[in-house]
Amino acid sequence: MHPCPAHTHALHSTVTETPVITTTGLTKVYRSRGREVIALDGVDLHVREGEVYGVIGQSGAGKSSLIRCVNLLERPTSGTVTVAGQDLTALAGRGPRAGKELRQARSGIGMVFQHFNLLSSRTVQDNIELPLEILGVSGRERSRKALELLDLVGLSDKAKAYPAQLSGGQKQRVGIARALAGDPKVLLSDEATSALDPETTRSILQLLRDLNRQLGLTVLLITHEMDVVKSICDSAALMEKGRIVESGTVSELLATPGSELASALFPVSGDASGEDRTVIDVTFHGEAATQPVVSQLARTYNIDISILGAAMDTVGGKQVGRMRIELPGRYEDNVVPIGFLREQGLQIDVLGQEPVLVGEGAK
Amino acid sequence: MQPLLSQACWDTLYMVGWSTLIAVLAGLPLGVLLVLTDRGGLVQNTVVNKVIGQVVNIVRSMPFIILMVALMSFTRWIVGTTIGREAAIVPLAVGAIPFFARLVETSVREVDGGLVEAVQSMGGNTWTVVRKVLVPESLPSLISATTTTVVAIIGYSAMAGTVGAGGLGDLAIRYGYQRFESELMWLIVAVLAVVIAVIQFAGDSGARVLHRRAGKGGEPLRFRVLAGFLPGGPVGATPTKTR
Ligand SMILES: Nc1ncnc2c1ncn2[C@@H]1O[C@H](COP(=O)(O)OP(=O)(O)OP(=O)(O)O)[C@@H](O)[C@H]1O
Ligand SMILES: [Mg+2]
C-alpha cells in the first residue's frame, strides 16, 4: 500500500518508523449536569518519530480533547496514551492531580497554544525561562538557553520586551521557543496559527517545519485549515464526531479511493462516467507528476482527452496531485489506456465504476 | 494642638499599617485558597471552600463596632489588653482579612485559565501555578485591592478610637464633636482626606504601571483620585478593572 519509492520519501525528511505518540482506544466523556458528551470515541493514533502529523476536523470533532489527552491535561475516560515509550495513563494515577512522574513526563512534551498563553507579567526571556525554572535549572544556564532559543525563533532583539509589545506572530514564536525550552522530543500544537493572518501563519508553519527538520522534532498539530496540512504535514488524520475516520501519510491518503482528506487536499470536479465517456481520477505522487503522461497517452492511443479539473501541490516536499480527465467511450473501451496509466505508476480511480468508499480508513 | 494632631496621625498610621500588613498576609492565602478549592479549581474541595466562604461572610457581615466587642477576649488573649493602639489592631485586622480575601478571590479568578494550563503542560504543580501565575498575573489587581483595604481600615480606625486607641478619628470626635471645636474637626477631616488621597494615588500608580506593562491599559488617573474623596466609604476604590 505504499505507492511511492522509498527514496523520494526520505528526501530531507527525518521520519523514522519508531512510534512516538500512540493512543489506543482513547475515549473521553465529559459529564456536566447529568448531560454526557462523548468527545473522543475510541481513538487510535500513531505518530512516528520525526514527522509532522496533522489532525483536522470540524469544530467540535474532538481535536482539542485529543491533543489535551496526549499530555493528560485532560484525563481520558479510558484507553492508553504512550509518549516516547512511556505509558502516561499509567503514570497519571487515580486522583485528579498530576503526580510527580506525570509532571516530569510533561516537561518532555512541548505545547503551543492558539492564544499563546504567555505570562503578561514576565518579559519574553523570562517567559522562555519559566519551564526551566520548573525543571530547576540554574539561573545562568536558564538565560543562556533562553537566548539561544530566541535566536532560533528569530527574536533575539526582543528578550527584554513584554508580550503586550509583540505582534501575534512574534508572540507565537515566543510560545514556540518556550515550548522547546525543556528539549522536548514532541511538540503539541492546538490551532497555533488560528489567531494569525495568512502571511504570519505561513511563517509560523515554516518555523515549525524547520524545527522539525533541524531538531528531528515530532510535531502533532491540530487544525481546521486544510492549508496547514497541505503545507507542512507528512501525515494527517481526519476526525469526525470523536473518531478518526481517515489517517495515513499524505501519499497513502492520496492513493486511497474516495479519501475525503485527499479530495479536500486536492479538490477536482466533474461528473461520473456515462454511456459515451469515462471519467477517471489520476493521482500523482513523486516524480510521475513531472512526466507529460497525458499528452503521451493522447499520442500513443490517438484519443481526445479532456481535463475536467486538476490540483497539484507540494506536500511534504514532494509534488503530488490529482487530475480528473475524460476519455471518449465507455469504460470497457478504455481498459488499455487505463492500463497504460497504471503502468506509469499512477493511481487511477474510475468514477461511477466502483462504489466510492467514503469514510473508509486509509490503512 | 500641633502635638495632639501629629500624635493622632502617628497612631492612625500605626494601627492602619499593622492591620493592613496582617490582613494582606492572611487574606492573600485565604483568597487564593477560595479559588483553588472552588468547583473546577486545581484542588477542588467543597468542604474547605464552604467553610472558608461562610466564615468570611459572617465576619464581613458584622458591623465593626460589634466585631470589636465580640473579639474582646480574643484581643486580650493576643495582646494582653483590650485598650490602646495594639488592642485596636486585632479587630481591625480580623475585620479586614475577609474583606481583602474576597478582593483577592475576585482578582485571582480573572487570571486566564490558559496560563494555568500552560504551566501545567510544562510540568508545574499547583504551588508553581500559584507562585508563577496566579499571584504575579493578578498583581496589578492585588495592589488595587490593597489600596481599597487600606482606605477601608482607615475608616474603621476612627471607631477604634472608642477603645482608647487614639488616632485621627478619635481626635475628631473628642475635640471636634464633643467640645464643639468644629474647625479642628474639619482640619482632621482634611488631613484624613489628604492621607487617603495619597494612599489612593500611590496604589493607583503602582497598579497602573503594572497594568500598562501587561498591556491592559489603565484608567485615567485623576478621576480615580477624586473618587477616593467621595463619601460612603471606599467607593471608586474597587480593584481596577480592565477596559
Ligand atoms: N470541558 C468540557 N466539558 C464539557 N464538554 C466539553 C468540554 N470540552 C469539550 N467538550 C465537548 O466535547 C466536544 C469536543 O470538543 P473539542 O474542544 O475537543 O472539539 P474541537 O475539535 O477542538 O473543536 P474546535 O475546532 O471548535 O476547537 C464538543 O462537543 C465540546 O462541546
Ligand atoms: Mg479545539
Image: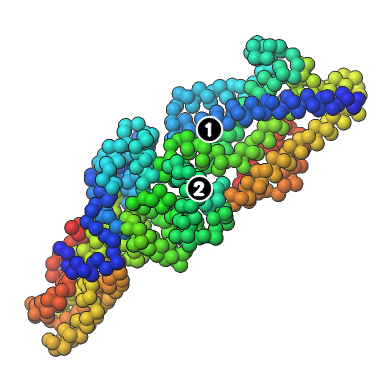
Nearer to us of marks 1 and 2 is 2
Pick the residue in front: A127 or B72: A127
Pick the residue in front: B38 or A2: A2
Asked which quadrant contains residue A255, the reply is: bottom left
Q: Position of residue A243 (x, y in %)?
A: 26, 50
Asked which quadrant contains residue A348, the reply is: bottom left
Count of number-bearing discs: 2
Pick the residue in front: A220 or A303: A220
Which numbered circle lies on residue A140? 2
Pick the residue in front: B190 or A121: A121
Tell me the residue at 34%/56% (across/down): A217
Q: Mark 1 sits on what residue?
A: B32
Tell me the residue at 64%/22% (across/down): B94
Instruction: Look at the image and tell me in which quarter the N terminus of chain B lies.
Output: top right
One can see residue A229 in this view: no
Number of other residues with Cα within 10 Å of mark 2, as a class: few under 14, some 14 to 19, many 20 or more? few
Q: Position of residue A357 (x, y in %)?
A: 18, 61
Task: Identify which amino acid the numbered label 1 is placed on.
Answer: Val
Task: Identify which amino acid the numbered label 2 is placed on.
Answer: Arg
One can see residue A347 in this view: yes
Which numbered circle lies on residue A341? none
Asked which quadrant contains residue A249, the reply is: bottom left
